[in-house]
């Protein structure tokens, strides 16, 4: 019969169809969701953020490629995951962070946070946060030097610290800040102001992000919208950010009710610092979070709780980063105790009758 | 979306929503298929013991005549689907691969479609055991794919204390592409209700619930209209969701009962039977005829006349595809649905009692499949899709390390019924179900040793 020119038919095992949403699709969408936040950061801080992102991106992708080459794995850049790491890292660094230090952060993040564990899927911690934690410890001054948003000449000049030569300390920028900022920019983040002077930044400023902080962590509202986009496309488990925010609010609420002057109000907790960015884009990283619904709720609530505890009682003003890293570290344990119960083993219906 | 629950039809949890692909065939009435020149009747079409042949080479048989008898309680007879001459009993290829014994029948040209052999019984006065025997003699097995002898399913396992309260009639047809049950419910409604009545008698269940996915509301209405007021039969629409047609899932959706791991539905007082099976039973029993043909959905790439066909058992797939005007190049031929069906290894494989569909996938569809496999990114989609509440992610990682025993001891591997939801959703393209099949086979081997 002429119909069957090719006698070979393939024999494969079921299922024979699949949903075509690959790892690359998911990761690419995360990248897309981060782009508006990056654009906003560029609008706030100008050329410095562009340079910062470019350097972090180049080091992250280069490091990923290098380690894949060394360990004989195929080119991993097609899965976009190191692009996400680079974007998140750039967005969590101060806008005027010296570029050479940013390169260190990118290298450490990918090398120690990801490649050492075996690449995508095997990392325990969020690689961007590993990079961030490393430079926080290594360069404590630079990581807390903030530039005012919307400063004059941001599209024609750089923040003075950006081009600090390697292995040198960055110049002090207090004079520069005075020269370029219109209103009195104190150089302190809303969290620091709240913590040490009990001055709470206005909610409006926090929502639109016109406060001091890392390049992309300030516009709470924009981050929320971008995160919701991913959640609606089922590329992010909405329970995680919700649990993080819920955990943070519930932890803060009793303190706020006891002493509203000393302690921040819950809305401030949600909108200040890196909580929004952390909750929606870093805690929700699939690799480092538990598998079951019960698991992610415990995990998210734990992160929210730790963030607030560190903020209120720790030596640092911001605790999101360490809270998420601790959350990542407890994921295997949470997973162990929140295994799904096999169908038919929970016979609630019959027991209650 | 738990907050929507009160507004939704009750269903099992988890599962997936694959593209149904039923549009090509759902509205095409069942058509009768011509006889091929030769029929291949495998003796092992049913679960349990193979049938025992009672014909010899060169013997003439008429349409409907028994050619093999049940060799045990868990076994069924076979009937000749056409009038012709027995060519011999030979090893022939099966869908699974290895060749097994089959009765070959050369069909007479112009063999009549009329069934020439039947054994009529006074059904309304038969005691239960005789009714079960009559069911066995029709050669009926589960037509939904399992091919488990129908009379065995309706008999309680000996020594068990269960009492069957409900007969669940499975009209979910959740597999994409398949539309046979849908057509049967529309076209053989009377047969179906009659079959349900027989099954109620045979199982001594107090009520029957016909569960139909809500993407087939025409069938829901048709079946509901055919029920007499004094029938203890109800029809219930259940959400269209895969694998709604899995026994345990449908029981959970309709009755809220969970069958414990490794137990039969009987342990919660339920017997499940497929609508196609009961409609066929309702047709055959009063006539005293045997199962000689079944309805099959034939569809997929390159098929000119996709549709639902009533095909003689034993028709070779090659003949079947030629008759429906298949053109182009088949890359893969699936027997059954795309989620749980089997790849045919040879075009000489015949249609069997348990085969519900033939689906042709072309090169393109297959290439899309062959994407890169990534490591597990712990996205938890498989965990949230598994209707058995297993942990395919952890099991997959253990399988990659060949820790097959741990998959069983820590993650309940045997409770996986290979529905395919996990593989379907995995963005890393990990062939999870394939891993689990291998792991189960390895564990079985080890248990034997
Ligand atoms: S194939 Fe097995 S593990 Fe995968 S979803 Fe189905 S029952 Fe669960
Ligand atoms: S769906 Fe695939 S990648 Fe996601 S957790 Fe399951 S096995 Fe891992």
Image (cartoon, grey):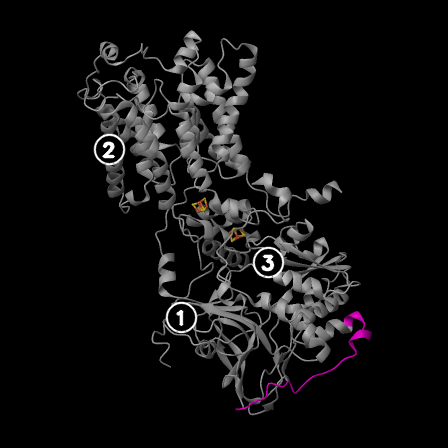
Q: Is mark 1 within 8 Å of ligand 1?
A: no
- The span shown in magenta is B109-129
Residue A239 in the image, given as x and y percentages of width and height: 51, 34
Q: Circle 2 is placed at which residue position? A: A59
Q: Quick check: is A257 in the magenta stretch?
A: no
Which-is-in-front pick, marks 2 and 3? 3
Q: Residue at x 69, y 84 (%)?
A: B118
Relative to A240, residue B323 above or below? below
Q: Is mark 2 within 8 Å of ligand 2?
A: no
Does the residue at mark 2 contact the one at mark 3 (Cβ under 8 Å)? no
Q: Residue furthest left?
A: A165
Badge 2 element: helix
State left or right for residue B39 relative to residue B191.
left
Chain letter of the residue carrying label 1: B
- For the residues labelled 2 and 3, the Cα–Cα distance comes to 52 Å
Does the residue at mark 1 contact the one at mark 2 (Cβ under 8 Å)? no
Instruction: Examine the residues drawn in magenta and state their main secondary structure.
Output: loop
Residue B148 in the image, given as x and y percentages of width and height: 62, 67
Q: Is mark 3 within 8 Å of ligand 1?
A: no
State left or right for residue A85 relative to residue B87.
left
Q: Is residue B402 visible?
A: no
Which-is-in-front pick, marks 3 and 1? 1
Which class describes the residues within 10 Å of circle 3: few (<14), some (14-19), or many (20+)?
many
Q: Circle 3 is placed at which residue position? A: B245
Q: Is residue A74 visible?
A: yes
- For the residues labelled 1 and 2, the Cα–Cα distance comes to 50 Å
Q: Quick check: is B120 in the magenta stretch?
A: yes
Residue A240 in the image, given as x and y percentages of width and height: 48, 33
Residue A336 in the image, given as x and y percentages of width and height: 52, 36
State left or right for residue B138 relative to residue A47.
right
């Amino acid at each position: 019969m002429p119909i069957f020119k090719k006698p070979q038919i393939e024999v494969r095992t079921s299922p024979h169809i699949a949903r075509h949403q690959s790892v690359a699709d998911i990761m690419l969408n995360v990248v897309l969701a981060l782009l508006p936040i990056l654009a906003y950061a560029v609008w706030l801080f100008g050329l410095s953020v562009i340079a910062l992102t470019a350097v972090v991106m180049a080091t992250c992708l280069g490091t990923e490629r290098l380690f894949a080459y060394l360990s004989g794995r195929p080119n991993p850049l097609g899965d976009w995951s190191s692009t996400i790491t680079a974007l998140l890292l750039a967005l969590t660094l101060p806008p005027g962070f010296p570029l050479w230090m940013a390169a260190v952060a990118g290298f450490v993040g990918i090398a120690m946070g990801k490649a050492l564990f075996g690449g995508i899927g095997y990392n325990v911690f969020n690689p961007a946060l590993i990079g961030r934690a490393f430079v926080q410890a290594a360069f404590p001054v630079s990581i807390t030097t903030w530039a005012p948003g919307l400063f004059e000449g941001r599209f024609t000049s750089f923040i003075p610290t950006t081009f600090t030569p390697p292995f040198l300390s960055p110049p002090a920028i207090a004079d520069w800040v005075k020269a370029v900022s219109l209103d009195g920019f104190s150089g302190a983040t809303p969290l620091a102001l709240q913590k040490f002077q009990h001055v709470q930044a206005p909610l409006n400023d926090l929502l639109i992000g016109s406060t001091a902080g890392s390049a992309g962590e300030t516009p709470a509202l924009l981050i929320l919208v971008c995160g919701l986009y991913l959640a609606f496309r089922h590329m992010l488990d909405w329970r995680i950010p919700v649990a993080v925010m819920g955990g943070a609010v519930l932890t803060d609420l009793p303190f706020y009710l006891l002493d509203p002057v000393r302690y921040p109000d819950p809305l401030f907790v949600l909108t200040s610092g890196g909580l929004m960015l952390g909750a929606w884009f870093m805690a929700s990283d699939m690799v480092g979070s538990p598998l079951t619904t019960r698991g992610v709720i415990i995990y998210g609530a734990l992160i929210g709780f730790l963030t607030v505890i560190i903020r209120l009682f720790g030596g640092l003003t911001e605790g999101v980063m360490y809270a998420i890293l601790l959350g990542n570290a407890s994921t295997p344990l949470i997973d162990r105790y929140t295994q799904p119960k096999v169908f038919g083993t929970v016979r609630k219906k019959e027991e209650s009758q | 979306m738990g907050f929507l629950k009160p507004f939704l039809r009750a269903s099992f949890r988890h599962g997936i929503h694959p593209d149904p692909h039923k549009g090509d065939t759902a509205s095409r009435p069942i058509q009768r298929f011509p006889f091929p020149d030769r029929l291949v009747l495998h003796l092992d079409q049913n679960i349990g013991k193979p049938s025992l042949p009672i014909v010899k080479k060169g013997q003439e048989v008429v349409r409907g005549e028994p050619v093999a008898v049940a060799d045990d309680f868990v076994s069924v007879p076979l009937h000749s689907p056409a009038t012709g001459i027995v060519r011999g009993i030979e090893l022939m290829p099966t869908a699974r691969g290895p060749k097994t014994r089959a009765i070959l029948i050369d069909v007479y040209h112009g063999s009549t479609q009329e069934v020439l052999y039947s054994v009529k019984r006074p059904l309304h006065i038969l005691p239960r055991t005789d009714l079960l025997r009559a069911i066995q003699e029709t050669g009926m097995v589960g037509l939904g794919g399992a091919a488990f002898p129908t009379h065995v399913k309706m008999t309680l396992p000996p020594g068990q204390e269960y009492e069957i309260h409900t007969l669940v009639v499975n009209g979910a047809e959740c597999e994409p592409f398949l539309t046979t049950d849908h057509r049967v419910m529309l076209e053989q409604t009377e047969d179906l209700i009659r079959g349900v009545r027989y099954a109620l008698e045979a199982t001594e269940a107090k009520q029957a619930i016909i569960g139909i996915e809500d993407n087939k509301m025409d069938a829901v209405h048709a079946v509901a209209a055919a029920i007499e007021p004094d029938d203890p039969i109800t029809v219930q629409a259940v959400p269209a969701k895969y694998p709604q047609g899995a026994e345990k899932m449908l029981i959970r959706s309709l009755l809220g009962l969970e069958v414990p791991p490794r137990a039969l539905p009987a342990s919660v007082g339920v017997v499940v039977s497929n609508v196609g099976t009961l409609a066929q039973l309702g047709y055959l029993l009063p006539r005293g005829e045997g199962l000689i043909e079944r309805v099959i959905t034939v569809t997929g790439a390159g098929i000119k006349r996709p549709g639902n066909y009533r095909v003689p058992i034993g028709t070779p797939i090659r003949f079947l595809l030629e008759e429906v005007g298949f053109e182009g190049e088949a890359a893969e031929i699936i027997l059954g649905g795309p989620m749980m069906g089997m790849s045919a290894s040879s075009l000489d494989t015949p249609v069997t009692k348990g085969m519900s569909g033939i689906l042709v996938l072309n090169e393109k569809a297959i290439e899309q499949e062959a994407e890169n496999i990534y490591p597990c990114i712990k996205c938890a989609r498989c965990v949230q899709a598994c209707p058995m509440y297993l942990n395919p992610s952890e099991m997959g990682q253990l399988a990659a390390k060949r820790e097959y025993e741990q998959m069983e001891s820590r993650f309940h591997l045997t409770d996986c019924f290979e529905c395919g939801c996990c593989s379907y959703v995995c963005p890393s393209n990990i062939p999870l179900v394939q891993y689990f099949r291998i792991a189960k086979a390895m564990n079985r081997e080890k248990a034997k040793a």
